Image (cartoon, rainbow, N blue to C red):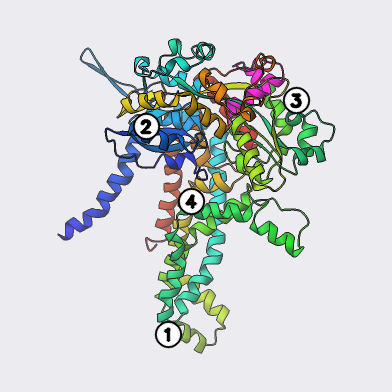
Amino acid sequence: MPPLIPATLLMLAPLAAQAQDTLNFYNWSDYIADGTLPGFEEAAGIEVNYDVFDSNEVVEARMLTGNTGYDLVVPSLEFMARQAQAGVFQPIDKSRISTYGNLDPEILRIVSGNDAGNTYGVPYMMYSIGPGYNVEMVSERLPDANTDSWSLVFDPANAEALADCGIALLDSPSEITAAALNYLELDPTSEDAGDLEQAMELLEGIRPHIRYFHSSQYINDLANGDICLAVGYSGDILQAKERAAEAGQGVDIRYVIPEEGAQLGFDMMVIPADAPNPGAAHAFIEYFLQPEVTAAISDAVFYANANKAATPLVSAEVRDDPGIYPPEATLSRMYSAEPHSARYDRALTRAWTTLKTGR
Amino acid sequence: MRRLVALAPLLWLGLFFLAPFAVLLKISLSEPAIAQPPYLPLAEWADGIATVTLNLGNYIFLGEDPLYLLSYLSSARIAAVSTLITLLIGYPMAYVIARARPGRQGVLLMLVILPFWTSFLLRVYAWIGILKGNGILNNLLLWLGLIDAPLVLIQTELAVHLGIVYTYLPFMILPLYASLSRLDGALLEAAADLGARPLTTFATVTLPLSRPGIVAGSMLVFIPAVGEYVIPALLGGPDTLMIGSVLWNEFFLNRDWPVASAVAIVMVVVLALPIAVLRRAQGGDA
């Protein structure tokens, strides 16, 4: 993967030729195996133009503008739900996807809560949002802290102790606020003004100890030891762990789904209504749902998939990691996000700006 | 033919400034919606009746929340400080280039322009590598024993100033050079003959005569720096409040294109007015 270019700049990138045998694929950064695209190109005889993003908001702005030129896009479920209301997607033609039956019916059922009848989306990967930390740096500063709890970052005393080695939070108001609400034992999907105020009070308490808010930079920084704790996406933190291990500098990263629970999210493959080549998109989904293809991606990016037939093929290292495939007991404490009303989003963004800038 | 050539700047202005400005103005008078595009149309045609709805609420809203005023001011302050630093660094450089032998001037100017051959984004990324906690500068200082622990240089306002000064320095040097190289050397000799010391000559002859270059260079730096988004996003800290990031939030987080457009329109007006006044004060010689 190339180093991340701010997603807004990618919006200026010219779109490739829209030949009949081309798939224009817009996916999250660091979210695919090395062999996936070459394998698809060979198997289907379709060339792939691959672009990446690091924020749902950018995808949404592009989708709502229209004429993106993409055939396949991977927004998160709660964003996809709202975009579907604007009529920007076309229904998935399941009859053209012979491998559709590999999907776990239980996961399809959960997802259908935000995509009735699984009309528009096919699950790509699943993620959770939690703290990942540098084991050595944290145990040096906080030898007695409970590292399996959100208090590792949300308790101001702990955050203060870690401030010098660096704490990063996702620059995602909805996801961090939901985690704060959950920690306060409030409903993480609440749009209540009082609840938001309490969540912000909690975050204000640790704000002086946060080095930065960013949604992808922490992968490298965690791996290099530039920061010692990041609240981020499960697989991203585990990729940092992998990179740190490869670098051999003795940096050991650990990702936890805390005892209090965490957000469970789904990234969904969707086909824009104005996709130049929906046939190629269907062909890719069919290829993707082959068990060995999905399993290879999970192994490469450390995210769980929704492909039941692929689970036995996923390497034990990934499959048995409770941070990737949460055990039943943990699953019961997970929550998922819901699309927000415009009014709540405005209040949330405003509160987030105050949190970040103090104004 | 001559008239056609004179039309070119007008065409440029119309195509690349006025037309986008009109589109922004239109969106800023609309209301957000979950649709494609995500705002309501201004004019509706139903049963032979055209209804035009203009929503001024977005502009009123900007006045109600102090955030917008604060971010305009903060952007202007950061841009002004950076412009001043750029001027202080750029002026001596331009002076030396203008005073160099003609054969060398070309080489020196080339060196000023050369960094433009690399992508702006890559050069800003290079600063991340230099400034970060585990980066080149900190490691060098640690090695020299000047500091005991890495300094926090990145994600600070200092880094934003540095990025702006570094990126825009050539825009300051080139107009200054143009002004200074036109300076008649005989004037300086005359001042010296009449007993002025070098500093007096500089203050009373060189500086006033290079004023058009100072004004042009400062504008070329200040105007884009106010609206700068990439540099504060990559080098700035979470508390760096600039209008670019406020625009981003309105556009992406709130999905409120109308308010985002209103913020942009106000920025153009707020920036264009003082500049027009300044130009008038300069008697149009800038």
The residue at which mark 2 appears reads as: A43
On whether residue A173 falls in the magenta region, the answer is yes
Q: Residue furthest bottom?
A: B193
Residue type, mark 4 in image: Leu
Dot 4 falls on a residue whose secondary structure is helix
Determine the CA span between mark 3 and mark 1: 77 Å
Dot 1 falls on a residue whose secondary structure is helix
> In front: A101, or A168?
A101
The residue at which mark 3 appears reads as: A149
Determine the CA span between mark 4 and mark 2: 37 Å
Dot 3 falls on a residue whose secondary structure is loop
Residue type, mark 1 in image: Ala
Label 2 crowd (10 A; few <14 / some 14-19 / many >=20): few
Mark in the foreground, 4 or 2: 2
Asked whether the residues under marks 2 and 1 belong to the same chain, the reply is no
Residue placed at 40% from the left, 81% from the top?
B103
Residue type, mark 2 in image: Ala
Residue placed at 66% from the left, 46% from the top?
A224
Residue type, mark 3 in image: Ser
The residue at which mark 4 appears reads as: B121
The residue at which mark 1 appears reads as: B186
Residue B237 is situated, as x and y percent measured from the top left of the image, at 62, 44
The chain holding disc 3 is A
Q: Earlier in the sequence, mark 1 or mark 4?
A: 4
Q: Name above or below for residue B268 compared with residue B64.
A: below
> In front: A327, or A14?
A327
